[in-house]
Amino acid sequence: MRSPAAAFDLRAALTEELQAAVEELEASPSQPKAVHRCRVRVKRARALARIGRAGAPGLAGVFNDTARGVMRTLAQGRDVVALAEAARAFAKKEGKKTATALLAVADALEEERLRAPGLNMEGARADLKDLLALALVWPEASPRQIRRGADRIARRARRARRRGFEAKAAAPRHEWRKREKDRFFAALLLGEAWPRARRRKLGEKLGDVLGRERDARLLLDRLVAEPDLAGEGKAPARALKALAARCRKFSDKADALGQKLHAAGA
């Protein structure tokens, strides 16, 4: 394993991510894509805070609890948008009748989003400012602490892969996805200070496939509970069959990518 080439300024990196999150939200608060970009910035900041846990465990705990509140607030409406987008994307690769059923699901989810309460902007702004305040007082992290934090993130990703590998239940697969996202963001943001093989392209691809699997599973669950979303007659059955096949495809692909990534010492 490589030693960090230089001290990593954790406080500056955290501050940069959170300032960018605030800017994304302020620029287009009503746009789902802007909210998504804001959430990604918060996820990146959470990965950095987990690295900083080695030097400031109490502060990292407060940061993570606050970040969870931000993510819950920003998830209002965004989760439905993501599922609608996934249904439309899956429809493009299906036959006409199945595609029609999946597009009906997407339209129903879009209508659901329009009926939902608007984003609590004041709450989101307040929580983001709290996170930024915590970032600004983060103690300087030594190279050794950065390495310890990075090693912990890598261990958690490996452990989550072992539990999620070939799992049929959604929970361990989702946990694996979250831990791989942490590993990817940490390796990306630390750069040369990441003490292991970064494998950023492979890590990004794995996170994307696990995300697609997650979307397919969530759509499948929604359709099991509300088959009428897909329309009448055989439409729900066609959509369910297609989504089950997508789940299997993405699951197999993620398992293979995970083996490849971790075999390389990521």
Image (cartoon, rainbow, N blue to C red):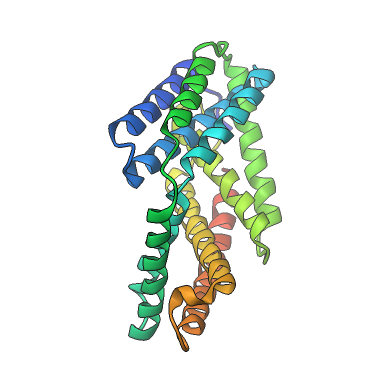
> Residue 188, percent across and down?
45, 35
Nearest the eye: 33 or 198:
33
Which of the 4 image quarters holds residue 51? top right
Whether residue 87 is visible, yes or no, is: no
Whether residue 236 is visible, yes or no, is: yes
> Residue 15, percent across and down?
44, 19
- For the point 40% across and 81% down, the residue is 98
- For the point 47% across and 22% down, the residue is 14
What is the tally of numbered marks visible in this picture?
0
- For the point 62% across and 27% down, the residue is 149
Nearest the eye: 217 or 168:
217
Q: Quadrant of the C terminus?
A: top right
Q: Is residue 223 above or below residue 138?
A: below
> Residue 163, percent across and down?
71, 54
Q: Is residue 44 above or below residue 13?
A: below
Q: Quadrant of the N terminus?
A: top right
Q: Is residue 97 above or below residue 229?
A: below
- Side of 41 relative to 158 (left or right): left
